[in-house]
Amino acid sequence: MVLSLLHYANILNNNNFKGSNLNDNNTIKDLYELLPNVFFMDISGGEPTLNKTFVSILDHLIEIDHAKWMHLEFTTNAQQINPKLLERLHHFKHVNIFVSVDGYKDVYEYIRWKGSWDKLEKNIMWLKENANDNVSVICHQTSQVLNILNLPELLDWYQQNNINWTNINAVTRPDHHNVLVLPEDIRNIARQRWENFLQTYQSSLTPQQEMNVVNIIQSLKTTDIFYEQKWWKYFVRDTMLKDEIRNQSLEKSVPDL
């Protein structure tokens, strides 16, 4: 887990804690001394909701009555959200919970092995219904070979349930998960689905959301036959190996592909 701190008065302008490990005792000791002067904290890497040190830091900030001045951000898979954590977050000035979502239903569970779509859906809806105004839930996703045909369904689910979503980051590494490896006919099918989504919801999208969708559509118009010929075989091999190891089935979970 990585901890990044930004103090608006530049007390931490030497970036002592950028990239620090929250499991290091010396880091924690130094951090606790500086926390009263910190007003922004971003937690990323690993799963914060399972990290006891993360929870301890929240409790400490609440105990010293400094949480009410702090803006907190963290990224989670939302598989472990619970009422006790949310109660802690209500003490902060503002909290952004960035939820990583890899696809819709079976595609989500295929990509995020051992993850549960039902649990994710339940937790997102629970947060939406129970979080105070100081807590924002924002879904982030990546676009790649395994989900490019499925993501419009996910975005449709967001829109139907009034769930906030922003970034769609294109996967470029590993190379064989870049959508450029897909044959043109599959990319055309994907592009049509994205265009249908845009046509349906364009009037209700924010400028950032619309930009993300337009960028995906443009990327699906790009053809690189040499890239496809080079990396498609790696995608096939990698997928077959993972299916065998994880006892999964691409054909069952991502039938469109």
Image (spheres, rainbow, N blue to C red):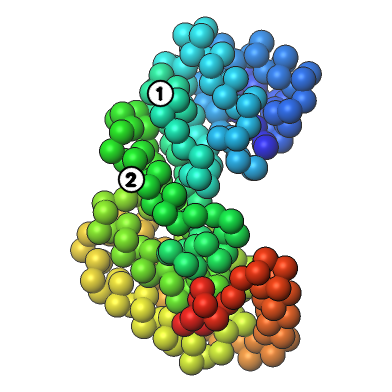
- Whether residue 175 is visible here, answered yes or no, is no
Which residue is found at the position 26% from the left and 54% from the top?
A: 161
For the residue marked with disc 2, what is the amino acid?
Answer: Met
Which secondary structure, mark 1? helix
Which residue is found at the position 45% from the left and 25% from the top?
A: 84
Relative to residue 118, is residue 62 depicted above or below?
above
In three-dimensional space, the C-alpha distance between marks 2 and 1, rounded to whole angstroms, equals 16 Å
Relative to residue 220, is residue 119 depicted above or below?
above
Q: Quick one: 257 or 212, which is closer to the camera?
A: 257
Name the residue that disc number 1 marks: 87
Name the residue that disc number 2 marks: 125
Q: Position of residue 5 (x, y in %)?
A: 61, 28
Q: Residues within 10 Å of mark 2 (few under 14, many from 20)?
A: some
- Whether residue 245 is visible here, answered yes or no, is yes
On the picture, is 196 further left or further right than 186? left
Total labels drawn? 2
Q: Position of residue 230 (x, y in %)?
A: 73, 86
On the picture, is 199 further left or further right than 167? left
Name the disc covering residue 155, or none.
none
Quarter the N terminus occupies: top right
Which residue is found at the position 67% from the left and 36% from the top?
A: 2
Which secondary structure, mark 2? helix
